[in-house]
Amino acid sequence: MMRKKWVLITGVSSGIGHFLANELCLRGYNVLGTVRQLENEYGLNSDIKLFIMDLSDQNSIKLAFDSIKTFLNEDKLYGLINNAGIAVPGPLVELSIEKFRLQMEVNVFGLFSCTQYAYKLMETNSRIINIGSVSGLIVSPFLGAYSISKYSIEAFSDALRRELRLFGIKVILIEPGPLKTKIWGKSIGVAAQFEGSQFSQFLNNADHIIQKTEQQALDIDAILPSILKALESNNPANRYLIHKNKRLVKLIATLFPSKWLDYLINKNLVYKV
Ligand SMILES: NC(=O)c1ccc[n+]([C@@H]2O[C@H](COP(=O)([O-])OP(=O)(O)OC[C@H]3O[C@@H](n4cnc5c(N)ncnc54)[C@H](OP(=O)(O)O)[C@@H]3O)[C@@H](O)[C@H]2O)c1
């Protein structure tokens, strides 16, 4: 009988990580998940083994991987899904260095360390799946810090893929557009965080833009087919874009003159009732 494959997913307390943990478990994977607190079971399948990990704390990442290594014993890790992430909103010239650092600690340095630790537990044909974003292809104002982190994941994935293919480990980048998860709600109230900002006029519209984006977002299960291809195809694509209008996103990201894009984006910054 074939042994079940071990897949580690970061950030399974909610959203994409939570959804994927339960789905992969149902599909016969052995799922390991990370959470920041073990206070409840988060409505996860009881077969999912949880480890505490805070991506903004390098020591916490090390301790989690010590436990994961002990838990796996002689078994190898088949997949790592670098999913956990945050979006820190705000105008770049007014964003504190601490907030910017947190954005990068979680989305970039944390992901970097997880990859290094997980790699040591992998073997040929294992998969590293990074959850990037359309924000790593097209930048929105007042989400600059988040975009910087997701552009970093684009470059990180390209370099890592070209390095690890030498050892038969596959690196796949998932680029979701808006999906219905809690991440959107977490950015509500940005105007209040930047009271007295010279961008107030625009930040006041942010909640409306966020709510509209969330309403139009795809259901979370739109991510599943790409994840399954990334895990199960013998020859997965380098990147999977998940968006209602993939062609338009690709066109805007690659061929659309950026001066036109600046014009269109700025025109839409002021919400007219
Ligand atoms: N939803 C979208 O539209 C969308 C689009 C493109 C890309 N993405 C990406 O998808 C990934 C998952 O986001 P989501 O939409 O599912 O959001 P979510 O529901 O907010 O989930 C984020 C997950 O990351 C965890 N996390 C946050 N800070 C952490 C930290 N310091 N250390 C460890 N874990 C931490 C959260 O744990 P806590 O519960 O403890 O906070 C949670 O489990 C992110 O990388 C995001 O950038 C999302």
Image (cartoon, rainbow, N blue to C red):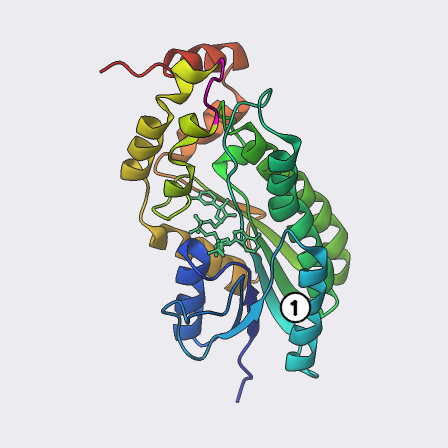
Residue 201: x percent and y percent? Answer: 39, 14
Q: Nearer the viewer, residue 67 or 189?
A: 189
- Residue 30 in the image: above or below residue 250: below
Asked if residue 185 lies left or right of residue 12, the reply is left
Q: Residue at x 39, y 70 (%)?
A: 44
Q: Quadrant of residue 128?
A: bottom right
Residue 166: x percent and y percent? Answer: 77, 57
Q: State which quarter of the image contains the C terminus.
A: top left
Asked if residue 101 lies left or right of residue 210, the reply is right
Q: Nearer the viewer, residue 196 or 187?
A: 196
- What residue does disc 1 label? 64
| 169 in the magenta segment | no
Looking at the rendering, the stretch of residues picked out in magenta corresponds to: 194-198
Q: Residue at x 41, y 21 (%)?
A: 203
Residue with the most extreme bottom position? 1
Dot 1 falls on a residue whose secondary structure is: helix
Q: Quadrant of residue 97?
A: top right
Residue 76: x percent and y percent? Answer: 67, 76
Residue with the most extreme left position? 273
Q: How many marks?
A: 1
Q: Nearer the viewer, residue 30 or 208?
A: 208
Residue 82: x percent and y percent? Answer: 58, 55
Kindly tell me whether residue 4 is visible in this rendering: yes
- Residue 92 in the image: above or below residue 79: above
User: Which SS type dominates the magenta stretch?
Assistant: loop
- Residue 73 in the image: above or below residue 117: below
- Residue 195 in the image: above or below residue 262: below
| 197 in the magenta segment | yes
Q: Nearer the viewer, residue 192 or 45?
A: 192
